[in-house]
Image (tube, rainbow, N blue to C red):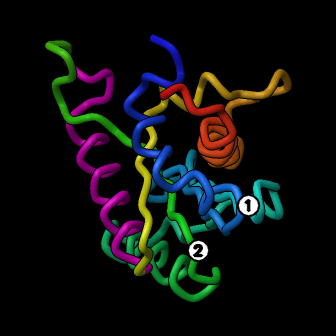
Amino acid sequence: MSKTKSKTYQKIKPIRNVILKGNLLCIDPSTGSKSSNPGYAWFENGKLIESGEIIVDVTGNRNERLYEIARCIREDFAVPDVLIVEYIPPMTYKGRTNQMNTVSLMALQKAIGAIIGAVKVKHLLEIPAASWRAWKPDNYVKTDEMDAICLGLCAIGLARLEKDD
């Protein structure tokens, strides 16, 4: 399937000007653990401005960690024109079982809910990993921060594609 026929492109097409000329906050979700924190990337006018990880106190329980993630998004970032979060598919996807175990999947879904609910935005995009991986740079190394950057690169790259209709 061509990139312009993908579901992700179809979601991006109506807001391509907002993506290219506005502010994007891209979040690679996590509940915060010893091995993973939510990654973030902030883009302005199609350019990466800042990226990193939202550091979460791993000694807190899940509720405390989710609260801290939401608080950080709400208080430490300006309200973006577009909030982009990785889409994590449900337990079954096209007849196959998701590779994650149920506990991890449910925790990620809760993190996504906390992230989405943290800030009131007009435009929300959920981009599946299969879409953003097509926009990985050559020097890609798997980190939460890099995954958040790739979410933004995907949205911007698809927004820059010529109309095919």
| In the image: residue 5, left or right of residue 132 | left
Picture residue at 48% right of the left edge, 35% below the top? 9
Which amino acid, by three-letter code, is at mark 2? Pro
For residue 58, above or below residue 104:
below
| In the image: residue 51, left or right of residue 134 | right
For residue 92, above or below residue 48:
above
Res 153 quadrant in image: top right
Picture residue at 28% right of the left edge, 34% below the top? 89
Q: Position of residue 127 (x, y in %)?
A: 45, 41
Residue 43, numbered label: 1
Mark 1 lies on a secondary structure that is: strand
Judge by depth and name the residue closer to the eye, 152 or 7. 7
Picture residue at 28% right of the left edge, 51% below the top? 109
> Which residues are the magenta region?
97-119
Mark 2 lies on a secondary structure that is: loop
Q: Position of residue 146 (x, y in %)?
A: 71, 42
| In the image: residue 157, left or right of residue 111 | right
Picture residue at 39% right of the left edge, 70% below the top? 66
For residue 14, above or below residue 44:
above
- Residue where numbered disc 2 is placed: 80
Q: Residues within 10 Å of mark 1 (few under 14, many from 20)?
A: many
Labelled pair 1, 2 in contact (Cβ < 8 Å): no
Which amino acid, by three-letter code, is at mark 1? Phe
Judge by depth and name the residue closer to the eye, 125 or 55. 125
Q: Position of residue 150 (x, y in %)?
A: 66, 39
Judge by depth and name the residue closer to the eye, 135 or 76. 135
Q: Residues within 10 Å of mark 2 (few under 14, many from 20)?
A: many
* Residue 107 is one of the magenta-drawn residues: yes
Q: Give the residue furthest to the front.
A: 165
Our reading of the magenta stretch's main secondary structure is helix
* Residue 165 is one of the magenta-drawn residues: no
